[in-house]
Amino acid sequence: MTFESRALAPPPPFPDADRPALFLDFDGTLVEIAEEPHLISVPTHLNESLAALSRRLEGRIAIVSGRAVGNLDEHLDLAAIAAAGSHGGEMRMAGAKSANPLAPIAIEAADAVRVLVGEHEGLMLEEKPYGMAVHYRAAPNAAETVIERLETLAAGHDLAVKRGKMVAELLPRGFNKGAAVHSLMMTEPFEGSLPIFIGDDVTDEDGFAAAAELGGFGILVGPARDTAARYRLEGPKEVYAWLTA
Ligand SMILES: O=P(O)(O)OC[C@H]1O[C@H](O[C@H]2O[C@H](CO)[C@@H](O)[C@H](O)[C@H]2O)[C@H](O)[C@@H](O)[C@@H]1O
């Protein structure tokens, strides 16, 4: 993956004429980061804004998140919007009842993560249908230990580790947000459109790269960093402003 380290400009106006498709990360992009996953504040206008975008884009919109699809459903009305959850491992097209199931991680590995979290005050465990995420926002000194232990468990159980903002997660191997974008772009209504991936975290870099490979671009949300995105916006408020200008 190639990264741009130059300062990134805000994106040009929304390219309606180019038949765009939107791939939207959730935490840090559509909602501000909170101290804990369940403490996020979802703007009251969000569902209405997503529905309006879906109409404007004739359905070419998907949420691509590290959260499981079931968890996204607790926060958003996704009845008419495609969802790629669990970092792209779960896929549910708009209007479909359920996402494809993944293999849950080995019981021994899950138990070992529970033990790890019990050993360090401040660590928070987020048990997901297909992964175990360890949040160290309240115990930053434990980050290195957490990552090392998860990497060891991943190697021993044929699993993967994904890192994010003050979090590391043990989950099945073989998928990422970029693969999810490629997969969605091969299906209607996304096929032949210009992909735009908007995200804030390191896991979104695969999405930025996929959008660029397919002729579109990525928009990084948050502070500048080395990134495969072409443009940058400051935060969720600026994302809404750009999407609705
Ligand atoms: O891909 P995303 O939609 O951005 O999801 C990534 C992870 O988001 C959540 O964790 C992050 O947001 C929390 C709430 O703001 C914050 O407390 C945490 O520190 C962040 O890492 C979610 O809990 C994870 O499961 C997602 O993988």
Image (cartoon, rainbow, N blue to C red):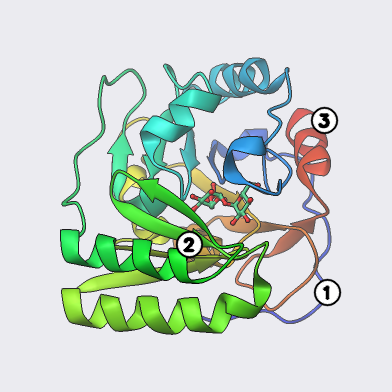
Q: Answer with mark 1 or mark 3, whichever residue precedes in sequence.
A: 1
Q: State yes or no: Cβ of the residue under disc 3 lies below 8 Å from any atom of ligand 1.
A: no
Q: CA distance from mark 2 to mark 3?
A: 38 Å
Label 3 CA crowd tier, 10 Å (few <14, some 14–19, many 20+)? few
Q: Answer with mark 2 or mark 3, whichever residue precedes in sequence.
A: 2
Q: CA distance from mark 2 to mark 1?
A: 32 Å
Q: Is residue 4 left or right of residue 25?
A: right
Residue at which label 3 appears: 245
Secondary element type, mark 3 = loop
Which numbered mark, 2 or 1, is in the foreground of this view?
A: 2
Q: In the image, which disc is placed on residue 7?
A: 1
In the picture, the quarter occupied by the C terminus is top right
Q: In the image, which disc is placed on residue 134?
A: 2
Please identify the quarter of the rendering in which residue 129 is found: top left
Q: State yes or no: Cβ of the residue under disc 1 lies below 8 Å from any atom of ligand 1.
A: no
Q: CA distance from mark 1 to mark 3?
A: 23 Å
Residue type highlighted by circle 3: Ala
Front-lying residue, 29 or 72: 72
Residue placed at 77% from the left, 52% from the top?
11
Q: Is residue 55 left or right of residue 116?
A: right
Label 2 CA crowd tier, 10 Å (few <14, some 14–19, many 20+)? many
Q: Is residue 34 left or right of residue 191?
A: right
Please identify the quarter of the rendering in which residue 105 is found: bottom left
Residue 34, how many percent across, how many down? Answer: 71, 46
Circle 1/circle 3 CB separation < 8 Å: no
Q: Answer with mark 2 or mark 1, whichever residue precedes in sequence.
A: 1
Residue type highlighted by circle 2: Val
Front-lying residue, 239 or 134: 134
